[in-house]
Amino acid sequence: SRHTLAVLVGSTREGRFAPVVSGWFARHAATHPHLDVDVIDLDTVRPYALRPGTPEFEEYAGRVAAADAFVVITPEYNHSFPAPLKHAIDLLNPQWHAKPVGFVSYGGISGGLRAVEQLRLVFAELHATTVRETVSFPLAWTLFDENGELVDPAPATKAADTLLNQLTWWALTLREGRALRPYGV
């Protein structure tokens, strides 16, 4: 059964490394034949400019609502995640309910895992379920070549497949559950 995976690219900083990480992940996810991948790049969506009721807001809300599962790609800034990512998450509420969220993080020595820990708390508050497995890139800029490919793809590919398999189980199970009975809060 096919399902839609929205990949949320959380960094909007000038000179960001996000396109390298998200490019690799989106290409890898697209090799899973049951997934329709929708990359939602916050640098394009510009969450601070979104106002409820505008076509841009409705388009963003619609893409999130249409997704069966999410992967959030986040760097770590000062032990946390970027402010535009928090704003983009907070703009919506029921669109996140009873859906699974996975994480791909990158950064310095911690590989962005402290950002992920905080994001788990945010998504719990939004009635989303986060999967345990993550893909993490410590010292990310040393792991990719000039073409945006991993120098040693095996560990990240294995981690990404595990993450995507867990997300798929949750996506299909929760979609079935929402269809049988609306999720109530």
Image: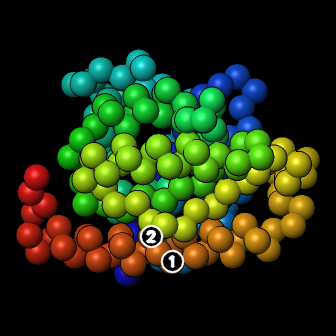
Residue denoted by label 2: 167
Q: Residues within 10 Å of mark 2 (few under 14, many from 20)?
A: many
Q: Where is residue 67 in the image (x, y as percent from the top left)?
A: 36, 57
When asked about the image quadrant of residue 154, the answer is bottom right
Callout 2: SS: helix
87 with respect to 78 (left or right): left
Q: Do the residues labelled 2 and 1 touch (CB within 8 Å)?
A: yes
Q: In this view, does 169 lie above or below 3?
A: below
Q: Please give the name of the residue rendered at 49% of the width and 26% of the height, measured from the top-left corner.
A: 83
Q: Is residue 36 above or below residue 117?
A: below
Q: How crowded is mark 1: few (under 14 residues within 10 Å), some or many (20 or more)?
A: some
Q: Please give the name of the residue rendered at 30% of the width and 20% of the height, measured from the top-left corner.
A: 51
Q: Count every numbered label the image shows and give the total.
A: 2
Q: Please give the name of the residue rendered at 20% of the width and 46% of the height, measured from the top-left corner.
A: 94
**Mark 2 and mark 1: Cα distance apart in space:** 5 Å
State how the image is colored: rainbow
Q: In this view of the protein, which residue sits in the foreground, 58 or 156?
A: 156
Question: What residue occupies the far bottom of the structure in this picture?
Answer: 1
When asked about the image quadrant of residue 1, the answer is bottom left
68 with respect to 25 (left or right): left
Tell me the amino acid under the disc marked 2: Leu
The label shown at residue 165 is 1
23 with respect to 49 (left or right): right
Q: Position of residue 43 (x, y in %)?
A: 56, 30
Tell me the amino acid under the disc marked 1: Asn
Q: Please give the name of the residue rendered at 28% of the width and 37% of the height, measured from the top-left corner.
A: 92
